[in-house]
Image (spheres, coloured by chain):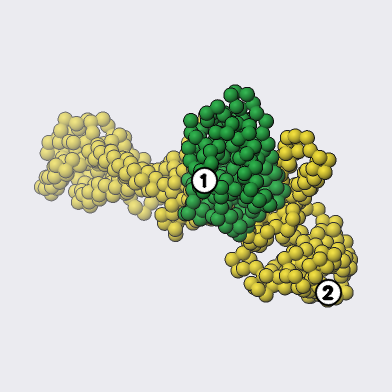
Amino acid sequence: MKFFPQSIRWRIQLWYVLLLAVIVGALLVAFQRNQREIKYQVVDRELTAPITRLLPRLERGREGGPPSRNRRPPRPGPGGPGDDFGGPRDRSDDRAAELEELVAQLAEKEIYVIHWAREGELRFPSENAPEDGRPRPEKITGRDEQISKRTLDGYREVIHAGPPGGMLVVGTSIVPLEEELSSLSYRLTGIGVLIVGGGFLVGWFLIGRSLKPIDRIGATAHRIAGGDLSERIAIGNSGSELGQLSGVLNETFDRLERSFEHQVRFTADASHEMRTPIAVILAKSQFALNRERSPEKYQECLRTCLESAQHMRSLTDALLELSKADSGELVLRTESGNPGDLVREVVGMMESLAGEKAVTIRCDLDETTAVFDSQKIKQALLNLLGNAVKYNREGGEVEVVLKEDGEEVVVTIRDTGPGIDEGSLPHLFERFYRVDRARKREGRGGTGLGLAITKAIVEGHGGTIRVVSELGKGSLFEVRWPRRN
Amino acid sequence: MRVLVVEDQDDLREVVAETLREESFAVDESPDGEEGLYKALNWDYDLVVLDVMMPVLDGWQVLQKLRKEKQTPVLMLTALDQVRDKVKGLNHGADDYLAKPFDLKELVARVRAVIRRNGGEHRPEVSVGRVTINTTSKTLRYDEKEVEVTAREYAMAELMIQHRGEVVSRDFLYDHLFDENDESMSNMLDVYVYKLRQKFGKDFIKTRRGQGYLVDSL
């Protein structure tokens, strides 16, 4: 059972129309009530007005008997009383005539008059009074006002208690009034339906218009999901909420696309780096097997294959390490220690390589303690120092400085190599980025991942790595990480 | 047939060069694009095996610069095997394209195919008079009987048959038969011509005095 539609458009539309209908309905009902009240007030005033003129004549008539009776029975109405009274004829005749005239005038306006005498005796129903005997209203007591009103069987009546003991009712049919009111109701209903209908259409249009960006966003997201990452949402009105949302989404898509491209390039680079050693192993082993070779040749081929396999191993190790860092699985076994000892150890390991290139390594190490994973930091420093030696000029210098800077340990490694051009600096820590593709790789050692791993290690320690370099003047790498976790 | 191998990966370059040498090509090597381009422009190679990702000048640049001056056949060798790269290579004037890692046998077959196409020869087997050469099995037959030849003799016969009907200068022969590391004296040519005449008859190779040698096209 889906009574409530799922579409936002329909929901908003439904609520909106419902609300509109309630408000319009309430207004129209109130208006109709008000109209009815006003009309009844008018009628009541019309009915009340003659009372003041009727009363004196009736009072007199009561003293000397109802004047109408004396002259002629006003009509063959219900039980017209006989005229068996004597009295001052002229005066009461005059009054009776006046009364009659008054009643006739009122009759023209569809108003009837009924008069009961003191003991409930019906004394005076005017000609146009309703045929069936009107019940005598209950006596009105305890009120200053002697006037009350009632609506009975389609008649509106104003009841005046008096002349004393008696009861005067002035009434009129309200059928035409009710008809008028009900036709007004129909018209109001019509108007209400029109307003709500119009509101529905306007609402439909407005909601449609304001929801249109959602369609666009949806369509764009759909295309992006389909694989076209370059798609963007066309932002119509950047001020609106949906415009802002589109902006945010576009930014997200940008970042998504960049990271996706990054991933694609990384995969392509990784597979490219893999291909070369595989090509060597494949070609070398095929070459060896092509024909009978000398033992030396076999040895050479096997050695080449071995070296390529070792290169592949270091590549896969590096990739694994990076993927661990990416997925946050880089486990650091941190303990407190003296980073100076570690730096000395790393420098010791580099000495033979430095000796080959006649590079001098100078150290300036402060004694300090810090918390770090010695294995990982050693790897990072080996990478940096290795680069500093490998890419140095013959007879160059490397300066390693370790010092405390507040709550941080800072290791700087400065070399006198060729330096790195400005364009390459931002990409330096990217995977497989090589500063100078022209530079011949030193043997098979480089994986192109060293600096990326170094960065991952340092950042794993909550630290930072940065590089300052100028072409022709060498480079400076600075690693800093907090001394305490 | 003289081939230049331009590849920055030492092991790979060596094994490719060595393999081609065993297939009786004269092979020169270059470890980077700049040197490769220099050699390709200054010698008339029958084919250049060109790696794409290289220091100094990459394969595309070498190809572009080479094509401005020469139509030397080029076989591109690279780790990028996306269709886009293949198309790019072929559109830039490469004659063939091989993705790493490749099969050595395929490389040799493609090298042969490219050379054959560019020598205007599509068939692996060609007959000239009573001599038949098969460039696939690298055999020579005289009156349908296979004749034993050394690699150098075969290479010379192949070159002469490829240029049958033309007078081939000694310099040309020398350039295409020996690589840069050969210390052979030019009179080695005379030795090979003598040996071939011995095996395939005096008229197989004719001497045009002062111009070179000729193998009749029929």
Q: Total marks drawn?
A: 2
For label 1, the residue is B209
B40 sits left or right of A14 in the view: right
Which x, y percent locates residue A192? 32, 43
Callouts 2 and 1 in the same chain = no
| Picture quadrant of residue A300 | top right
Task: Say few, some or many: other residues with alpha carbon within 10 Å of mark 1 (under 14 / 14 to 19 / 20 or more).
Answer: few
Location of residue A226 with respect to B123 vertically, above or below: below
Mark 2 — on which chain does it sit? Answer: A
Chain in green colour: B
Location of residue A136 with respect to A88 vertically, above or below: above
Residue at the image point whose x is 22% and y is 51% from the top: A49
Task: Say few, some or many: other residues with alpha carbon within 10 Å of mark 2 (under 14 / 14 to 19 / 20 or more).
Answer: some
A279 sits left or right of B69 in the view: right
Q: Amino acid at mark 1?
A: Arg
Which x, y percent locates residue A121? 28, 36
Give the SS element for disc 2: strand
Location of residue A405 with respect to A320 vertically, above or below: below
**Would residue B32 be visible to someone looking at this image?**
yes
B72 sits left or right of A388 in the view: left
Distance in Å between CA atoms under marks 2 and 1: 75 Å
Which x, y percent locates residue A414? 74, 72
**Would residue A260 be visible to someone looking at this image?**
no
For label 2, the residue is A363
Give the SS element for disc 1: loop
Q: Amino acid at mark 2?
A: Cys
Q: Which mark is residue A75?
A: none
Colour assigned to chain A in the rendering is yellow
Quadrant of the snapshot with the N terminus of chain B: top right
